[in-house]
Image (cartoon, helix red, strand yellow):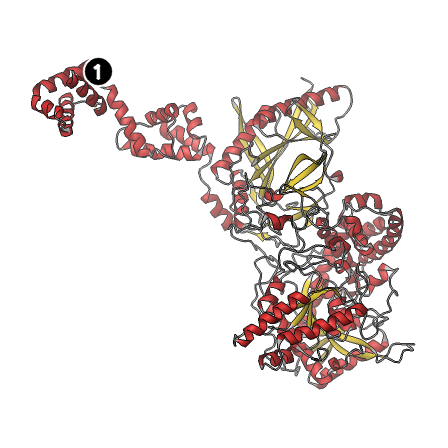
Amino acid sequence: MIDTCNLTIKDAASLLASKKIKAQELAEAVLARSEKLNKKLNCYVTICSEIALKQAKLVDTLLASNQKLGPLAGIPIALKDLFSTKGIRTTAASKVLENYVPVYDATVVSRLKDNHAIIVGKTNQDAWAHGASGENSDFGPTLNPYEQSRVPGGSSSGSAVAVASGTCLAATGTDTGGSIRQPSSFCNLVGLKPTYGRVSRYGIIAMASSLDSIGHITKTVYDNALILNVTAGQDNFDSTASAKPVDDYTQNIEKGVKGLKIGLPKEYFDGLDPNIRKLIISAVKTLEKMGAIVIDVSLPHTRYGVATYYIIQTSEVSSNLARYDGIRFGNPREKFGAEAKRRIILGTYALSAGYYDAYYLKAMKVRRLIKDDFINAFKKVDALICPVSPTLPFKLGEKNNNPLAMYLSDIFTVNANLAGVPSLNVPCGFISSPRETSSLINGLPVGIQVIGPYFSEKLLYQVGYAYEQETKWYKRKPEL
Amino acid sequence: MNNFETVIGLEIHIELSTGSKMFCTCSADYFGAKPNTHTCPICLGLPGALPKANRLAIEYTLKLGMALNCQGQLSSKFDRKNYFYPDLCKGYQISQYDKPFSQKGYLEIKTGETTKRIGITRTHLEEDTGKLSHAVVNDQRVTLIDFNRSGVPLMEVVSEPDLNSASEAKVYSQKLQQIVRYLKISDADMEKGSMRIEPNISLRKMGDKSIPHYKVELKNINSFKFAEKAINYEVERQEKILESGKIPDQETRGWDEKNNRTVSQRSKELAHDYRYFPEPDLVPFVFNKNYFLKLKNDLPELPDEKRSRFKKDYQLTDYDIEILAREKDLADYFEEAVKVGSKHAVTPKQIANTIINQKPNIATVMPAKLIQKIISQTKTSTVGQEELEQIVDQVLLENLKAVEDYKEGKENALMFLIGQVVRKLAKKSDPTLIQKLLIEKIKT
Amino acid sequence: MKKKSKSDSSLITHYSSRKIDIDYVARLANLPLTKEEKKTFEKQLKEVLNYFSKLNEVDTRKIEPIDHITGLVNIAREDKAAPSITQKDALANAPKTHNGFFEVDAIFEEQ
């Protein structure tokens, strides 16, 4: 059986091209592993065995006739269950959409299908992308494969676990306030939140329209760049998608960081957990050794990010979820989970007559200041490095009864969404979990964020790649 | 009757005649189609769908704004108007709130001998909703929804409360309809629903210049006749309430055709808390003065201008001009005919009379043909019947061989005889009449 | 920026010290809530709203609200019609349909 846990897209593509493996073999391997592990880890809402095998068969036929296919041909990819897939159930991990089957594909899905990627399944998540742990799913929480008593992060919980557990070679996600970066950091994976508008949002169930960024999770930086090559670019169906030409993100990825100015925003390090801080600083030192110049910078409005974010996000959420009225599709509104209901109420309130100026309008002004912070910082440095999460992956149930505590854990990720800038999570080490008794402990994953100016994904990959090749944290797999 | 003054503001919705819908590429020509056959993920509000604005609809809206003497806004945007109703599939309508495409214009109407300027607050663009109908299914009363109309571009023209009677409201509405049709941006047909009038009516004490503290909105009016009736009914109803010392409720009322009255409607939106915020799925629009100038120059001549010019250039009566300028196509046709007619000494007055009295089908009768018709009809009137008969008899006597040839079946002979008659007459005459007469006489 | 601005800050403090009228908001949001939910949410949301008043510390008197995050303008499409989805697809996920229409319980507009 193929070792899908250690297989990268780069390797798989080469094996397929050189006919050392068949797409069907690869598909069968991931499907078998998915079926086996899903009962435990609960990372899939739907596993698409029939469709995947059919797609794989087609790829083999095309490859056999020596047809030149795209870079993702035969590569098994999982899709966060917000991505509309024609003919395949799409639930947003909510009971409201339990039986909803879209009649059209999201643009990103079409692009992946056109490239002959294999759709393994639809991954579990916090329902409607509301959450940072995976515990808000209406179909049960997803477990962190490195430590199954702990959360994998969210809201792209299932996508992260699907990749980390070797049941697919990549998974798509959305990042509205950290929902790709944080689970990637909790699961030792590479996760990209692209520039807002770099990847089309059409067909992806909207959470907060001005904040949703469409990205993906992979084992390695190179793999991640490969996928962005396919998903990025203008879309006639999305008025907010950028028409800027798409780079070849893999080209020159080994450029290195010599002479690169890297900023450390002090607000992200004040009061940071010392263990996490140690790992981040160690990563920065590694980059310095490789020639980067490290400069202290300030993003003065950082502390207002969570409040600003939650006002704007819940306002847009309350409006985006209005279409779920049970008339044209879906179940009635009482089926919304508690977190969804909370956010709808909060957002409706923030927009309501008499409160709009105090909340929404105020937040839109502070948002401008937060955006300006980044623009000013990028006048001094080429990229920023900072932590992703103020804590290690926490225990299941630990933050359940306190919504505000959960919201505060987004502090390091929300500002990039408010500004619209791209950010890449790269694994930077492991920390032994405190007071753990199990002998299976080899530590909990930690990630660093590399944040860049608008449309600087190529640069982010170069920084991430340089660090990754020096440290190779991706080699430490979960014991499953 | 004398104590109170009527204050009316009109909100008029106009469905644009674009080929595709406002935010998606579904055909906007849905009239008569089977239910839910002109839909897509976008206008059905399916999860994940996103809007993309129709450029032509925006242009149409700007054009109307210009025609209504509005100030074009240099920057404009769409906003979400949030409320729940089964015909509103997203749970919000994409509309415009504080930065509509045009603001602060006016429309002048004739009230008797005077001209009155009615202020136009704004002209904005939004999307139409689906259509509800009612039925009984399995003994249960149900409401049925058709989303074919959902997403069709809808323009809203809001007037200042400057109208003071039902008849003024009617004149204003008809003039707006005429301008819209001139611009060819909508067929503005009230029966078809492509033009909808919603009057806001209140009363205030005569002499009082302040805006009344309440207003009643009327809906479900689908003809100018009903608009007048509804407004007059409302005015009476409100008068009675005010005279009794109370203030009419601020509410929405529907016109009940059957019973000729207005009835209170359950409000569909909770206290009108629409929670407007800028539409994040669409980007803002910015225009420059040059663009507005170009649009203005590209506007066709509007009804008022056309009427004054017709008066000056053609010296026709007001009555004639009213009819000729009622529709742009007819006005253009008239002027084409005038051009052709000038080469044949046919006067504008003659052309006007012919068009007004005979109502030719301007789609099939070319202006040149119309002129010919006029010429032939005029020819007829310059020769008396007696004189004609005399000449015909003469020609028959002088051309016996031709008569014989015709009797033997030679059609050319008849043509020859007609020619002879025309020559002898040396006046304008109708060849068909001559032909008829010749044949008659030859027979006998 | 920790300057306190009288005109901004008084707004949020003033509002957050009020109770959320959860019945009103739930109706506005077309969201049926149980008694327990209303109680729980009222408490939790009060905490969150209190936290939001942090924004009072930011002086935004001279700040314009952010434009569209993309900075793009004038994105629109040509008026060109394209085929719609079929009636079957349009109705595919509806719980109740009738003769090509979506069906819901009767709505009465007149009182």
Marker count (numbered): 1
B159 lies above or below A257: above
Is residue A265 visible in this depiction of the protein?
no
**Quarter of the picture holding the N terminus of chain A:** bottom right
Q: Toward which corner of the image does residue A430 lie, by quadrant?
A: bottom right
Left-right relation of A465 to A332: left
Residues B160 and B225: in front is B225
Left-right relation of C32 to B104: right
x then y, percent, for residue A278: 82, 79
The single residue placed furthest to the bottom in the displayed view is: A289
Residues C49 and A263: in front is C49
- Circle 1 residue: B384
Q: Toward which corner of the image does residue A52 lie, by quadrant?
A: bottom right
**At 41% from the left edge and 25% from the top edge, which residue is drawn?**
B320
Q: Toward which corner of the image does residue A218 lie, by quadrant?
A: bottom right
Left-right relation of B423 to C4: left
B157 lies above or below A75: above
Q: Chain of mark 1?
A: B
x then y, percent, for residue A211: 70, 60
Tell me the amino acid under the disc marked 1: Gly
* Element carrying mark 1: loop
**At 84% from the left edge and 57% from the top edge, which residue is drawn?**
C51
A377 lies above or below B359: below
